[in-house]
Image: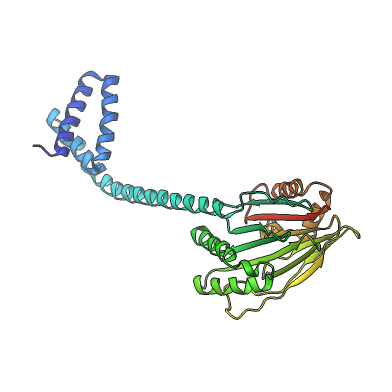
């Protein structure tokens, strides 16, 4: 039985001979179909040139020496081209594999984010999170407890891609495994820090802010692990304050100590959580000032919280030409009753 490539060679010879005799569209179609078989059999470009030269020499024995020499030249060109082409194909296949892996990780990220909206009569909550690329280094989480307390978390994984997605899962499941500390923000961050420090490399670390809102006493307790300070809007004085809190980023030192802070939340006050993709928006080569973010928050402060975060995002995305250079996450929690 003839080898598959031998059969393809005979088929090529037959198709080329018929085409040279008839110059028909059917011949071109057959050549197109044959090219697919040649690719499947991994026939290299230089092999195809060699085959073409052999067939022409058989069909036209009187071919001039210059024409025959030109095929020698083309064959040498195709050797180099074939090597480069195969390398390109290998890189393309690897890129497709990586993109597939990134798609899986991006989908995994989405499963880590809250699915159901909170239904808290006393609060108006708005959230927007937009990745700069396919995958995000930002993470947010919220959970409602039976004692009318709601926990809120926002984190920024310094790193991208699949490692960031894995870190997100570690943070989420670490929080879920510490139910007794959800009402103790500093203690929760201390335990998460130990988990992170043990499980991620030196090239990655995580900033995070966690707090819980007590809907009975209308108090907000929070702690920070080096995260970008948010804002606190005080309706009585119509002023914005930085929501500052000291704390080392997660994963740097196992012995890090975190501090808890408290604010009394009055009617129409709201808390702003954000990632540094909000305050570090760029116009040209310069970052915008935090005061500019405040100006947009003030501009839309009368809107429902969800409309408010979406409007602020649209403003900040527009001044950047809708070209985000960092992940953007903004969450607003307003007392409405």
Name, please, the residue furthest toward the right.
Answer: 237
Q: Quadrant of residue 41?
A: top left
At which x and y percent is residue 167?
Answer: 53, 63
Quadrant of the image for the N terminus? top left
Q: Residue furthest bottom?
A: 255
Residue in the image at 79% along x and 47% along y = 304
For residue 90, above or below residue 224: above
Q: How is the image coloured?
A: rainbow
Q: Position of residue 72 (x, y in %)?
A: 21, 43
What residue is drawn where x is 82% and y is 51%? 301
Left or right of residue 96, residue 54 in this image: left
Residue occupying image coordinates x 25% and y 35%: 37
Image height of 115 relative to 148, above or below: above
Q: Is residue 253 visible?
A: yes
Q: Is residue 272 left or right of residue 34?
A: right
Give x and y (percent) for residue 118.
69, 51
- In the image, residue 222 above or below residue 142: below
Position in image of residue 270 (x %, y %): 80, 57
Query: Residue 53 occupies which quadrant of the picture?
Result: top left
Q: Is residue 135 visible?
A: no
The residue lying furthest to the left in this view is: 1
Disc tally is 0
Q: Is residue 193 left or right of residue 233?
A: left
Residue at image x 22%, y 39%?
48
Picture quarter containing residue 213?
bottom right
């Amino acid at each position: 039985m003839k080898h598959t490539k031998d059969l393809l060679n005979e088929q090529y010879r037959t198709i080329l001979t018929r085409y040279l005799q008839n110059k028909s569209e059917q011949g071109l179609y057959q050549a197109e179909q044959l090219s697919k078989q040649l690719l499947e059999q991994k026939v290299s470009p230089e092999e195809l040139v060699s085959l073409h030269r052999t067939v022409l020499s058989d069909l036209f024995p009187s071919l001039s020496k210059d024409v025959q020499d030109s095929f020698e030249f083309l064959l040498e060109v195709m050797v180099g081209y074939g090597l480069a082409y195969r390398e390109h194909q290998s890189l393309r296949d690897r890129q497709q594999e990586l993109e597939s892996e990134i798609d899986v990780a991006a989908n995994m990220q989405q499963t880590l984010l809250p699915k159901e909206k909170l239904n808290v009569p006393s609060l108006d909550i708005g959230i927007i999170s937009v990745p700069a690329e396919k995958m995000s280094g930002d993470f947010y989480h919220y959970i409602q407890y039976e004692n009318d307390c709601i926990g809120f978390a926002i984190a920024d994984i310094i790193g991208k891609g699949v490692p960031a997605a894995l870190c997100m899962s570690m943070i989420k499941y670490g929080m879920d495994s510490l139910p007794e500390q959800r009402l103790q923000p500093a203690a929760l961050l201390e335990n998460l820090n130990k988990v992170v420090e043990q499980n991620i490399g030196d090239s990655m670390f995580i900033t995070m802010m966690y707090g819980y809102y007590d809907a009975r006493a209308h108090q907000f307790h929070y702690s920070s692990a080096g995260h970008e300070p948010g804002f606190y809007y005080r309706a009585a004085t119509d002023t914005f304050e930085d929501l500052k809190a000291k704390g080392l980023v997660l994963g740097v030192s196992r012995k890090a100590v975190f501090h808890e802070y408290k604010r009394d939340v009055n009617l129409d006050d709201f808390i702003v959580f954000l990632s540094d993709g909000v305050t570090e928006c760029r116009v040209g080569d310069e970052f915008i000032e935090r005061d500019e973010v405040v100006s947009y928050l003030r501009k839309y402060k009368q809107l429902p919280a969800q409309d408010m975060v979406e409007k602020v995002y649209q403003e900040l995305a527009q001044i950047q030409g809708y070209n985000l250079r960092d992940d953007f996450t903004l969450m607003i929690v307003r007392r409405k009753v």
